[in-house]
Amino acid sequence: MLKIAMAQMEVVPGHPDVNTATILRFIEEARAKGADVVIFPEMAVPGYFLGDTWEQSAFLRDCESYGRDIIAASKDITVMFGNVAIDWQKKNNDGRVRKYNAFFIARDGELVQPDNMPYPYTIKTLMPNYREFDDTRHFFSLQKLARELGTTPSKLLSPVTLKIRGQRYRAGCLLCEDGWSDDYEFAPFELLEKAHLDFYVNISASPYTLGKNDKRNRVFGRQAREAGVPLFYVNCIGLQNNGKTVYTFDGSSTAYNEKGDVVRTLPEYEEALTVLPLAEMKDMAAEPESEEKDIAHIYRALHYGIRRFLENIHMKKIVIGISGGIDSAVAAALYAKVVGPENLLLVNMPSVFNSATTKGLSQELANNLGCQYMIIPIQESVDHTIKQLEETPMVNLGTGSETHLKVSSFVAENIQARDRSARVLAGAAAAFGGGFTCNANKAETTVGYSTLYGDQSGFLAALADLWKYQVYALAHYMNDVVYGREVVPQGIIDIVPSAELSSAQNVDEGKGDPIKYPYHDYLFRSFVERWQKATPEDVLEWYKAGTVEKNLGCEEGLVKKYFPTAADFISDLERWWNLFTGMAIAKRIQAPPILAVSRRAYGFDHREAQNGAYYTRRYRELKAELLAE
């Protein structure tokens, strides 16, 4: 009876030595458990998101060398693993050496060649070139190879015949995107289906995205059911990034039987190895569908991502500026679970505009966490800065004339934010021996509701891919489930969100941020996360049809509540669109790295150009029509 092991390993990007040691350890474990086959993830040797490290020939040679170590370790066991494959005699379209994203199979120290492939490995067919993926920049696809050889992908894409203990098994080998073919010109899975296989293997390096696992179970379950053979999906865990955006890889490796049922799922964010007897899978009971709420998955992604990010940069202590608001409170509760309260310093930095209410809530939060706490008032420093700016003469060196700057109330707000971050938090972090966080949420990040070199500063923006309503949900989840007690004070959850930078934002009078989160969270989400991104034209079409809330997914009645007239609605829409496509882009470019959880995170996942706001011809027609009514 053929026994197949799925090895869910942590892949450390850019460290083939570390990854190979992990692979060799898992090979020994699989062998000890009687497995005939052991499967590892896509790009298990080098990692996936490496930027232009792929252009280093020395690194490529190292990956080849470690690949040979894995092949040599395949005595009496079939090892399936992902690695970069190099054809040193050919070039990519960029003139650099030819590289393939490849699926290797080794047995008894030798590679097993797919039936029709010109190389002793399977080459990835479908190259994702959207969101965080940039495969065509570095890798040559099977499609390109087929054109080069004067043939078709369908003739090259072929199963691998395995000879194990006197039996022959035919395996269909797929690499990640090859199983997600809906929007491509052909489907590798369906091409292989004609070959009468015994099982499929999909090795993946698939970042966590909210809701992706449910969709994958539907898609891959259907594939296994229609083909009538089991499918093994093996994903890695770990943390990888492409500079501005940081991605968690959750694993969740899954085995589907020939009925399409999920019969084995490996845990999120944990290394694990499981062995399944191929012949018994059809009779295995389907695992029950998870009833966990989305926020539970988000919490695990954030906790794991923060922990691994800190480990990667060797940071053990954290400083957080807390205001008595929800974002900094949730950040504090998150980091306390990662580094421990003894390594967490919370700093409250009140000005004359901070109420006794929020100062008291900050103290309550710190008491609940049992962490380090400081209160550093900033008003004296802010006043001193304003006085210096206004009283220091500004000399025109061409004419010798003198003038003085005038600090407006808006500039004074910015000075407060910068004093808190650039002076207090930066200094406290250096003295404490750690780093300070950026606590921005996704709504604020969307429209640049933050101050450059102020509250937008920090080493990581862990909450910047969460809308405000998700931040509140996370506060409830941590109180109810993670801590099992009230850590984030209910008063912080209940209070109106406010930056408290002026008397116009007095929380005791119910005054807060200009963003109406119950509506704007969803409006901003339509700008960013819809696959066909919404523009003001789309939003005005919905307004005209009376379907704004339906299309955005927000609560019915909010448009009428917030915007009594079409002029009010249009003014609000243009205000935020101008910011989203204007100054907010400049701020996002300078923002800290963002930890991704959504289907579209800022940074490399949402590529932007600083071109300014644009309104289509149809938008201008709709605007004129609505304002004339």
Image (tube, grey):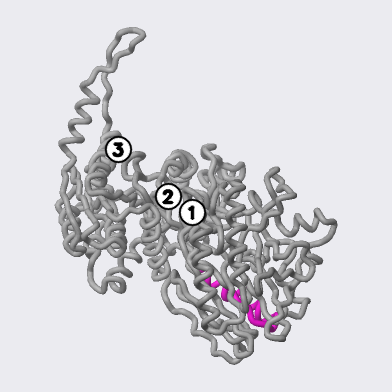
Q: How many numbered discs?
A: 3
Left or right of 156: which side holds 72? left
Mark 1: which amino acid?
Asn
Residue 504 appears in the picture as rendered: no
Q: Position of residue 171 (x, y in %)?
A: 70, 76
231 in magenta: yes
Tag on residue 593? 2
Q: Residues within 10 Å of mark 3 (few under 14, many from 20)?
A: some
Q: Is residue 297 above or below residue 166?
A: above
Q: Residues within 10 Å of mark 2 (few under 14, many from 20)?
A: many
The quadrant holding residue 364 is bottom left
Q: Is residue 162 above or below residue 157?
A: below
Mark 2: which amino acid?
Pro
Give the residue at the far bottom of this rendering: 283
User: For the residues marked 1 and 2, what is the alpha-carbon distance in whole angstroms?
Assistant: 9 Å
Residue at image location 73% in from the left, 59% down from the top: 142
User: For the residues marked 2 and 3, what is the alpha-carbon distance in whole angstroms?
Assistant: 22 Å
Q: Position of residue 62 (x, y in %)?
A: 58, 54
Which residue range is magenta in the image? 211-233
Instruction: Report which residue position mark 1 lands on.
Output: 241
Q: Earlier in the sequence, mark 1 or mark 3?
A: 1
Instruction: Report which residue position mark 3 lands on.
Output: 414
63 in magenta: no
Work out whether residue 210 or residue 311 is closer to the camera in this orientation and state it: 311
Q: Are marks 1 and 2 in contact (CB under 8 Å)?
A: yes
